[in-house]
Image (cartoon, rainbow, N blue to C red):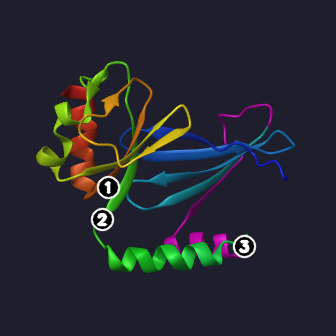
Amino acid sequence: MIAMARIEQTKLPGVGVRYEFETEAGQRLGVIHHRTGRRELFVCPPEDPDLPSISVHLTDDEAHSLVDTLGGSQVVESLADLKQRIEGLAIDWLTVESESKYADRTIGDARIRSRTGVSVVAVVRNEDPFPAPGPDFHIEVGDTLVVVGTPDGIELVADILTNG
């Protein structure tokens, strides 16, 4: 079995999500997915993993071309087809922080669906997925809620988790 690099995901509040991994040479390689849809490819040298030595902004077409070049064309085609069928729908991963008003409470207590129209389709806890959790599912600090809905609705869920 081929060992794959571990991809780290970091939420960038108000910006999007940063995905990165370390190459065998010790460089940090990653992509920032901006909430606007823009993507930024970056490479950081081993001596300073926080200072990009290369940063490239990619349009959607350029990002798809890069994925094609790396061998992911079938995935891109599938996602493009799915996007056409569900335009206006977004998916996000929201981490429950220790300050969350709903840490140690249930999904039903937060009334996410009734307040925002957004569905919690899964919860990831310590790398263990819990698909289709019901309203009685107990939310813990560090859980990642996988949510589907409109971008505005998802922003409301993020606010609900933080501020109640």
Towards the viewer: 96 or 61 = 96
Instruction: Indicate left or right for 35 with 110 as reference.
Output: right
Amino acid type shown at disc 1: Val
Which residue was labeled with disc 2?
89
Are circles 2 and 1 on residues that touch, CB within 8 Å? yes
Say if 104 sits above or below 40 in the image: above
User: Which region of the structure is painted magenta?
Assistant: 46-69
Instruction: Indicate left or right for 151 with 57 as reference.
Output: left
Residue 34: x %, y % from top left: 44, 53
Give the spatial CA distance, label 2 vs label 1.
7 Å
Label drawn at residue 148: 1
Residue 16: x %, y % from top left: 43, 47
Q: Residue shown at 77%/49% (left/top)?
A: 4
Amino acid type shown at disc 2: Leu
Q: The C terminus is located in which quarter?
A: top left
Q: Give SS at disc 2.
A: loop
Q: Residue shown at 72%/74% (left/top)?
A: 69
Q: Residue shown at 82%/48% (left/top)?
A: 3
Label drawn at residue 126: none
Are circles 3 and 1 on residues that touch, CB within 8 Å? no
Instruction: Indicate left or right for 22 with 102 as reference.
Output: right
Residue 71: x %, y % from top left: 72, 73
Residue 110: x %, y % from top left: 19, 33
Queried whether the magenta region covers residue 64, the answer comes back as: yes
Which residue was labeled with disc 3?
71
Amino acid type shown at disc 3: Gly
Q: Give SS at disc 1.
A: strand
